[in-house]
Amino acid sequence: MSENEIEKIGESIFESIKHVDENGNEYWYARELMKILEYNKWQNFEKVINKAMESCENSRILIFDCFTDVSKSIITGKGKETIIKDYKLTRYACYLIAQNGDPRKEVIALAQTYFAVQTRKQELSEKEYSLLTEDEKRFYQRDLTRKGNYSLNQTAKKAGVKNFAKFHNAGYKGLYNGETADDIAKRKGLRYREDILDNMGSDELIANLFRISQTELKLKRDNVQTEDVANDTHYIVGKNIREVIEKNGGPMPEELPTPKKSLKELENENKKTLTNQ
């Protein structure tokens, strides 16, 4: 079976239970994946999840970054409280689960191949990246910023951040010489609540990705515990990156051109093209 055939089957099976959060991050629920992978009992599937977690830890990747506990309590008909165990899984977590599943199941073999192919597609070499068109680079960098923001939000939450709009604006102010997200949107001529990151070129996205990753590292390294310090940290990192760009003679982020079409518009056009084929 070719990768294209696997991809088509995978899209009909595994993509059907895929979810996307408000930041554009993909995830799957373990309970839903369990049914697809033909496990009838949670106890048996949880053993596979535990093995996958061990593999994740052995890969030196934080388990909670890939396996988020979303267990909930329910009241049964008899009035007894019961905990329903569940996890929110990343694509990589699904891959690890498939790798640790029952190899005798045909659907496990399909899952192993499908998630391996999809994970590999998200990792481009420098040569492959250089061959992409500008819009393809934008899609690639936008995906990385979504993942980066999700991870940054988790770290910021642990650092005491509650007002995330203020926290992210602190970073924008540092990088964009005082501009907030709303200021950037107005300068770009965007509609109300239109995503500013979807309306950036690849170079501008890279600058923001650097801001995101460096802020997360500094929050962890400095063991930041209060919201005010977290906001100050984000601002300082953004400002430092701006100074580096300036020293290297590069254009300031606000000077970079806004693409004619947002990534959402391009995505809708691609969907229409595929529908009409």
Image (cartoon, rainbow, N blue to C red):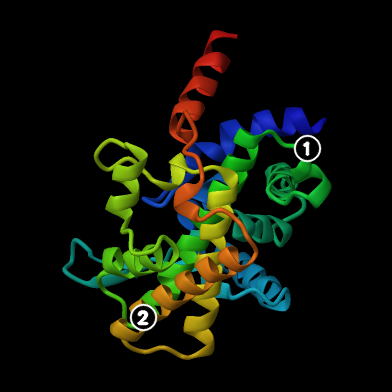
Q: Looking at the image, do the residues carrying marks 2 and 1 touch, with CB atoms under 8 Å apart?
A: no
| 262 sits left or right of 49 in the view | left
Residue closest to the eye, 108 or 79: 108
Element on which disc 2 rests? helix
Q: Mark 2 belongs to which amino acid? A: Asp
State the SS at label 1: loop
Q: Which mark is residue 131?
A: 1
Q: CA distance from mark 2 to mark 1?
A: 38 Å
| Position in image of residue 7 (x %, y %) | 69, 33
Q: Nearer the viewer, residue 75 or 118?
A: 118
User: Front-most of 226 and 232?
Assistant: 232
The residue carrying mark 2 is 232
Instruction: Give the quarter of the figure containing the C terminus.
Output: top right
Figure label count: 2
Q: Is residue 89 above or below residue 106?
A: below
Q: Which residue occupies 78% across, 37% down?
A: 131
Residue type at the position of mark 1: Leu
In terms of sequence position, does the residue under pointer 2 or pointer 1 come before the other? 1
Residue in view at x 41 percent, y 88 percent = 224
Q: Is residue 163 above or below residue 123?
A: below
- Residue displayed at 64% across by 36% down: 134
Residue 92 lies, in percent from the top left, at 63, 58
Residue 254 percent coordinates (x, y): 44, 51
Q: Answer left or right for 3 relative to 200.
A: right
Which quadrant does the N terminus fall into?
top right
Q: Pick whichever, 24 or 67, lies toward us.
A: 24
